Amino acid sequence: KNQVEQSPQSLIILEGKNCTLQCNYTVSPFSNLRWYKQDTGRGPVSLTIMTFSENTKSNGRYTATLDADTKQSSLHITASQLSDSASYICVVSAYQAGTALIFGKGTTLSVSS
Amino acid sequence: NAGVTQTPKFQVLKTGQSMTLQCAQDMNHNSMYWYRQDPGMGLRLIYYSASEGTTDKGEVPNGYNVSRLNKREFSLRLESAAPSQTSVYFCASSDSIAGGTRNEQFFGPGTRLTVL
């Protein structure tokens, strides 16, 4: 069964600190992996997308990594800001009939001053 | 360019009432989706439309119907609302549903529905 598991479920860090969020998946055949950011009360917004051949991609202070062999991804946030407080959702795309996206349940990040 | 818009933003219904959630996109996307999001459950797919004129069930279709009115608009109808349908509903669109980078989904702001 195709699944996406994220950890931790929630995280609290101080402003200015770094943090790393994890995503493990069992999706086959794998197409690509995305990280979305969802602010409270808003819809998810895409941060990065990585295909099988990519193992690192950055978007400002956000850096995503992908290890297709171990089926793991991480999202590293550098020098966190209060505005980083949000839910971060890992989404894996498979080559399959019908809609191909499998969503993780998300990690809720709270950045405090 | 508004992206994906949804109406209404908030709605309170009584059990048994019906309503339609509206969604429109201006990105000329072929595919559209309806999700519900509940605490601790993540996003779950209700229905999707791969292209104009087609609709298919997702993971949790019971109690819902959809209409792909045209390429821009995709509506979700609750015929007889139940408290279990209290949730936040998101509409999304993408260029394609197939595997590959064209299936990046763009989400609307959501509709917060409470069924009493």
Image: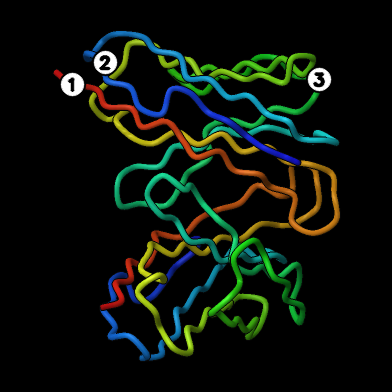
For the residues beneath circles 3 and 2, the answer to whether they share a chain is: yes
- Give residue A13's mark: 2
- Give residue A53's mark: 3
- Distance between the Cα atoms at labels 1 and 3? 36 Å
Label 3 vs label 2, nearer the camera: 2
Q: Which callout, 3 or 2, points at the residue further toward the start of the chain? A: 2
- Distance between the Cα atoms at labels 3 and 2? 32 Å
Query: Looking at numbered disc 3 in the image, what kind of residue is underneath it?
Result: Ser
Kind of element beneath mark 1: strand
Q: Nearer the viewer, residue B88 or B50?
A: B88
Where in the figure is residue A9, as x and y percent of width and height? 41, 29
* Count of marks placed on residues: 3
What is the quadrant of residue A13 in the picture? top left
Q: Does A90 sit above or below residue B93?
A: above
Query: Looking at numbered disc 2 in the image, what kind of residue is underneath it?
Result: Ile
Q: Which of B116 and A47 is in front in this view?
A: B116
Query: Looking at numbered disc 1 in the image, what kind of residue is underneath it?
Result: Ser
**Image quadrant where one finds the N terminus of chain A:** top right
* Subunit under mark 1: A
Q: Is the residue under label 1 in contact with that under label 2 (CB below 8 Å)?
A: yes
Q: Which callout, 2 or 1, points at the residue further toward the start of the chain? A: 2
- Find disc 1 in the rendering and name its residue: A112
Q: Does B61 sit above or below residue A12?
A: below
